[in-house]
Amino acid sequence: MDTLFKRKIYNEMLVWKEQSAGESALLIEGPRRVGKSTITKLFAQREYRTHIVIDFAKASTEEKNLFNDLSDMDYFFTRLKLLKGVSLYERESVIIFDEVQQYPIARQAIKYLVEDGRYDYIETGSLISIHKNVDKIVIPSEEETISMYPMDYEEFRWALGDSESIPLLKEMLQKRKSLGDDVNRKMMRDYRLYMLVGGMPQAVSKYIETHDLMMVDKVKRGILRIYEQDFHKLDKTNKAKAVFKAIPSELHKNATRYQITTVLGKVSSDSTRGLIEMIEDSKTVNIAYHADDPNVGMELTSDKSSYKMYICDTGLFVTLAFWDKKFTENIIYQKLLNDKLDANLGYVYENAVAQALASSGNKLFYYTWLSENKHAYEIDFLLSRGFKIWPIEVKSSGYKTHRSLDEFCNKFSNRISNRYLIYTKDLNKDGETTMIPIYMAGLL
């Protein structure tokens, strides 16, 4: 049985239930094994009198045939209740369509089921936005969509029985007060463990059960193989799988963008765009697009051909980065735990920051430019806040230099409210720059 962890998405589901009052279905998107089915069933058990689950990954022919004729709703629900042996109560029951991308006709039926108004509906899906799965159906406008991410750092701490640390860190960040070197070292040790285990519920559960990182690594390899299989089903050329697996090596190059031609060879821009959209829709990655004009509304001026790609979960990223090595040879585990990470492995920290920002609801953008003397500068992440932007530079060490950040702020001074350096040392200030430890990245 799946471990029941406390997840923040539960409160989002409560808001939907109260505000929707049956006028829309809830669609929960996210990568495979992120906990969508578990949280949905838990929500149904706690918040409704009864519930029915139709898992389209293994639904019977009889269950699927129900959706061939929706002309008589009374007859539809009678057959459903008989098949499932569950009573349904008007406005007190919910019907769950699990892995609904496996049977698009059921997703199309949501329009008519919501119009009927008797019950609530929750759908879960992976790779659900892929055009192959929806090109022959009418997408229901009666859907509200929320994304589910791997467990963020606060959820990870909850799983380990710690509900105090993150609220205290939020308070310290708001007051801009340092923690002290001893506390910071302890916080960094805790966070490095999170980077290794990651936020996939199966991996977290295995760590709590065994405290054995080798066993955790096996779980993560199993999840990555599932992702590979999914990509192969959607793309028989295996280009999508190749692009996904090359993410660590592309970040390792420290280039200004993901260089897809080095992975796939010469490909047309149209086919590349479709491929990247498919990978992005899978929710297995977080993509940062280049902001050609770093200002509020960066989506409007982003360059879809220039991007950096990150794995949705840093624990999976660590395993993928050393995919061809046996666990006992995986030096990154020892180096991360002992704070001996080489400078050229700093891309692990960059992936962790991307995950923290994305799971907090931020769209990811970055910016690069050449100075007059052709020096290359880069801002790792740009956040839009009100009418201003927050530039962020990420360091994998305690180095306090932030030349790119300074040059960017000089270049766009009237557009900036706050500026941040994310690194491994204690919270501090350097002029206008707030320097925060990486475990606070999700609090921005």
Image: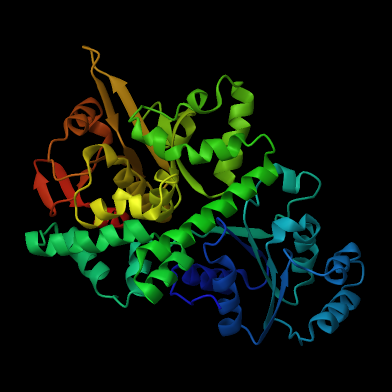
Foreground residue among 337 and 91: 337
User: Is 281 in front, or is 222?
Assistant: 222
Q: How is the image coloured?
A: rainbow
- Vertical placement of 9 versus 275: above or below? below
Who's the residue at 54% across and 50% down the image? Answer: 283
List x then y, in percent, for residue 388: 31, 40
* Residue 323 percent location from the top left of the image: 44, 46
Q: Quadrant of residue 107?
A: bottom right
Q: Is residue 391 visible?
A: no
Residue 400 in view in this figure: yes
Left or right of 133, for residue 367 = left
Q: Count numbered badges in the picture.
A: 0
Q: Residue at x 32, y 78 (%)?
A: 161
Horizontally, residue 346 falls left or right of residue 28, namely: left
- Relative to residue 37, is residue 329 depicted above or below? above
Q: Quadrant of the N terminus?
A: bottom right
Q: Quadrant of residue 186?
A: bottom left
Could you tell me residue 189's position as x and y percent? 21, 61
**Which of the two residues, 367 or 213, is positioned nearer the viewer here?**
213
